[in-house]
Image: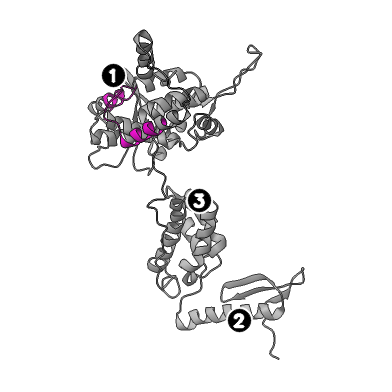
Amino acid sequence: MGRQQRGIYPDDNETWQVDKHWRGTRLRQRGFQSAGEAESWLIRQLEQLRAVAIHGTRPPRTFEQAAANYVSTNQDKVSIESEVYLLQSVMPFIGHLQLHQVHDGPLKPYVAKRLADGRARKTVNLALGVVRRILNLAANSWRDDNTGLTWLERAPTLEMQELAGYQREPKPLSWGQQRTLMPLLPDHLARMTLFSLNTGVRDDVVCSLQWSWEIEVPELGISVFEVPREHVKGRRRPRVVVCNSVAQSIIESQRGKHDDFVFVWRRERVKNFEDAPVMSYQPIQTMNNTAWQNARKKAGMPDLHVHDLRHTAGMRLREASVPEPTIRDVLWHVSSSITHHYTVAQIVELHGALEKIKEDSGRWNKSLATLRQEHEARRKEQRGAKVPQKSPTGEKHKEKRASSFGANPLI
């Protein structure tokens, strides 16, 4: 019998471990059931290292090592936190594999598990996209210092999940749905919701909006907020939030509550109102909180997303016949025509566009999504009606029409 390799030791729990240094590389592994199993593992690792040293072959690297290198070299990337989260979900399936072993086969159990857990196909594709990016970098960019060879000879083509027919369509609010939802929201969340509907900004911008970003526009008697690029999706450059009269009234109602943040909340007392100390206002981390979820459920819209408020603003701008370039400016969509510095003329244009969507005008040029929602609402009402209702006449009809189309759903 040959002599046992050095670097193999019995462990405390009746298993064996390997701990060996070879030419500056540490080989360590635990949990072997026998000394022979540990020795076999060590011999394979040494053969691979000798092949690299003698013949210049690629040193073995696991996907976990490649992922760690990707994260450490992309700390300034805007989406790195999201990508780390996605990598954590896929690591139990492929993290231990060597790079050349990562392909569609080992990834199938991951895809099946994520879909079974209710994850959207788009979310699964985002994770597969990060894996694909790492493999492409390993095959094309990252090179071994000793051999000069890339970490991976060739990157595989990963199969992405089909999205057509599986993605959730945007569900913009109708004016009737808005009037149903608003009273069910707590006051601080109702103000944030109405602000988003009248400006088209993302919910994370609403939550982070700060007084130091405010710039007065005397020509219009309103304020705009210059949002730093750190709070803008993509972080390419600062953007401006223009307030119409409804949004401006919400801004004015928030003054004096907090030194830094515009939208804040505090738990209000239901009794002993005069007792000290008065609770201080606190920033709001997210609009998609328990209060939002409870309100949308009570309103009969359990699938309403906070991002649908942004879709609603875009739809209403289109209904109001606002030009497409102006809509892109309001919603911060990428456009080569947008200048890096907003002029007063541009702000006037954006303000005028947003003024057109501050209330329900009963416009006839509704979007297909709105028409579908109204059609489904009528069918639901007809199915639930037990006794046909007579059409109101005279003054009652005038009152009903006025309350349906003329009221500002705020405050």
Q: Which quarter of the figure is the N terminus placed in?
A: bottom right
Amino acid, disc 2: Ile
Give the residue number, with chain letter if any, for mark 3. Answer: 119
Mark 3 near mark 2, Cβ–Cβ under 8 Å? no
Direction top: furthest residue: 395
* C-alpha gap between disc 3 and disc 2: 42 Å
Q: Looking at the image, tell me whether mark 2 or mark 1 is earlier in sequence order.
A: 2
Kindly indicate the quadrant of the structure image that contains residue 339.
top left
Whether residue 260 is visible, yes or no, is: no
Residue 370 position (above or below residue 132): above
Secondary element at tag 2? helix
User: Magenta residues, as a range?
Assistant: 350-377
Q: Position of residue 192 (x, y in %)?
A: 45, 27
Give the residue number, with chain letter if any, for mark 1. Answer: 220
Give the residue number, with chain letter if any, for mark 2. Answer: 43
Q: Position of residue 69 (x, y in %)?
A: 48, 61
Q: Nearer the viewer, residue 223 or 401?
A: 401
Q: Position of residue 76 (x, y in %)?
A: 43, 49
Residue 274 position (above or below residue 78): above
Q: Which quarter of the figure is the C terminus placed in?
A: top left
Secondary element at tag 1? loop
Secondary element at tag 3? loop
